Amino acid sequence: MPHMPPQHTRDWIDVLEALGPLMAVIAVLIIGFVQAVLQRKQLAYNLFDKRYTIYSELGAFFLSAVSNDLQLDNAAVDRFRVGTAHAEFLFGQGVIALLAEVDSKAIQLALVNSKLYRLLAQVATASDSPELLALRQAHAQLVNWMFEAHERQNTVFHGYLELDTELPWYARLEQYMEDLLERLDKMLNRRAEQG
C-alpha cells in the first residue's frame, strides 16, 4: 500500500497568502484617496495664491493712488489693469464690481491729477481760480473714495481668501444628519397640523 502524504492543514501563512491581494487593493485605494485629497488641497492653495496676488495688487494700487500726490497717471492705472485682468475668472461679482469701480475712479483720478499738475505748472499764483478749486475738490473726493474703498477691500475679499474652511467628512456627515432630522421634524409637524 502506497504511503499517502498527510493533508496540509491551513495555517496563518495560507490565510495571509489569500488576503495578500485584497490588502494590496485596499492599500492602493487608500493611497489613491490620499492623493485625491492632497491634489484638491493643492488646487485650493494655488487658487488662494492667485487670488491673494490680486488682493495685494489692489492694496498696493490704493496706496500708490493716495500717497503719491498728483503722481497717479495712466501708466499706474494700466499696471493695475494688467495685475487684475484675470480677476473675473477667480472671483464673484462683489470683487469684480469693486475692481471695476476702482478702475473707473482711478481713471478719473489720473485725469484730475493730470489737469491739476498742468494748471499748477502754468499758473503758480492762481490759487483762487475756480477751475483749480474745482479740480482740488474733485481730487479730494476721489482720494477719499479710494480710502473708503481700501477699507471695504477686506470685507469684499474675505470669503475668497480663506483656507481649510472645509469641515472633515465626519463633521459634514453629522451636520447633514442634523439638517435632515430638522427637515423631517418640520415635515412631520406640518402633517400633524394639517391632519
Image (cartoon, rainbow, N blue to C red):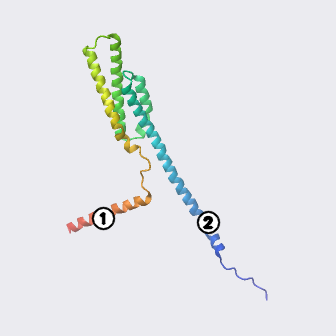
Between 74 and 122, which is closer to the camera in this rendering?
122
Q: Quadrant of residue 175?
A: bottom left
Badge 2: residue crowd in 10 Å (few <14, some 14–19, many ≥20): few
Q: Which mark is residue 184?
A: 1
Q: Residue at the location (36% across, 39% down)?
A: 154
Residue 181 place in picture, x, y as percent: 32, 64
Q: Is residue 81 visible?
A: yes
Residue position for label 2: 21
Q: Quadrant of residue 157?
A: top left
Figure quadrant of the N terminus:
bottom right
Between 25 and 118, which is closer to the camera in this rendering?
118
Q: Quadrant of residue 152?
A: top left
Upstream in sequence: badge 1 or badge 2: 2
Q: Residue furthest bottom?
A: 1
Residue 10 place in picture, x, y as percent: 65, 78
Label 2 element class: helix
In the picture shown, does residue 83 fall above or below 1? above
- The residue type indicated by label 1 comes to Leu
- The residue type indicated by label 2 comes to Pro
Q: Residue at the location (44% across, 58% down)?
A: 169
